[in-house]
Image (spheres, rainbow, N blue to C red):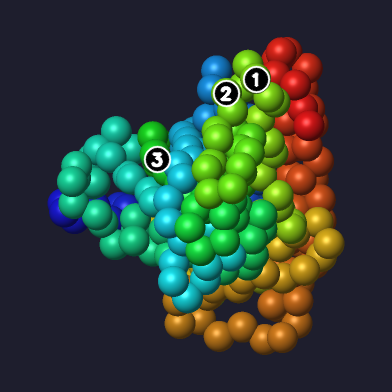
Amino acid sequence: MPRELEPAIAQKEFVLTALKQGLRTDGRALLESRNIELVFGEELGMVECKLGKTRVFADVSATIVRPRQDRPYEGLLTISSEISPMASSVYEAGRPSDEEVAITRMLEKVIKRSGAVDLESLCILAGQRVWHIRLTLHFLSDEGNMLDCGCLAGITALRHFRRPEVEVIGEEVIVHSPEERAPMVLSMHHTPICITFALFEDSASPVLDPSHLETQLATTTVHLALNAQKELCVMHKAGGMPMSVEEIMKCVRIGVERVKEVTKLVNDALEEDWKGRVVEIR
């Protein structure tokens, strides 16, 4: 993997000096996020999320497989990501970068381990047939904070997706097409949203939704996954800068308010998309 060039000294000093004065190079306030845009594809479960100039495309698919022997009543959820050279010249096709691995692991924690999707609802025939849900994320453009953009794209795609309805007659499983019976929404316990902060040694306030340059210069980054119920699902801190309890709680309080706004945006976007579709909702 090609090594990414470090910012020039003059550029670094300019950005850090601006942050000390509460200013950012893109004109945002320290606790202001970039605009979010959700674009839905023709097929259910296809969503492109735009966070400023950062873009991620999410695709959800479902197949019927045998369950794990130790969990015969649960379906499967697999999350994979791909950062292609399209996102940035520092990434190589076919070779997972360290950032790609880190993002995939974080998404596993945020979406899968937090129990966002009800895996038991994916069971068709206990011990024999279950749904296997695959969430694939394609990172199209890296202008900073790919984790938040990817998490939002993934969780929106899961809510947008509809699986075919199935009927079990004895040992036989019949999968009905959308023309025969309306597809079923995935059962979800909650909607976790990832919020990222960047911290700098000489800045009194954390920086919300850091850009690519700000991420490069940050001393520490903090990733929080929260839901609309004000539950903290995941917290991950990368970097050696120590944080007090008050500083952590400040980030959590800011994150809670931001999650409310993002959740409402997602709900409104999904509702607006369904108005233009002929698929029956059950």
The x and y percentages for residue 191 are 71, 53
Compared with 136, 273 (above or below) is: above
Is 83 on the left-hand or right-hand side of 168?
left
The x and y percentages for residue 210 are 54, 53
Q: Mark 1 and mark 2 in contact (Cβ < 8 Å)?
A: yes
| Residue 180 seen in this snapshot | yes
For disc 2, the marked residue is: 177
Q: Quadrant of the N terminus?
A: bottom left
Label 1: few (<14), some or many (≥20) within 10 Å? Answer: few
The x and y percentages for residue 203 are 61, 68
Q: Quadrant of the C terminus?
A: top right
For disc 1, the marked residue is: 180
The x and y percentages for residue 197 are 60, 62
Sequence-earlier tag: 3 or 2: 3
Total marks drawn?
3
Q: Nearer the viewer, mark 1 or mark 3?
A: 1
Q: Amino acid at mark 1?
A: Glu
Question: Residue 47 sits in which quadrant?
Answer: top right
Compared with 156, 104 (above or below) is: below
As helix, strand or loop, the secondary structure at mark 3 comes to: strand
Sequence-earlier tag: 1 or 3: 3
Q: CA distance from mark 3 to mark 2?
A: 31 Å
Q: Amino acid at mark 3?
A: Phe
Q: CA distance from mark 1 to mark 3?
A: 35 Å
For disc 3, the marked residue is: 139
Question: Label for residue 98?
Answer: none
What residue is drawn where x is 66% and y is 44%? Answer: 186
Query: Of 210 and 137, which appears nearest the observer?
Result: 137
Query: Of 271 and 55, which appears nearest the observer?
Result: 271
Q: CA distance from mark 2 to mark 1?
A: 5 Å
Is 162 on the left-hand or right-hand side of 267?
left
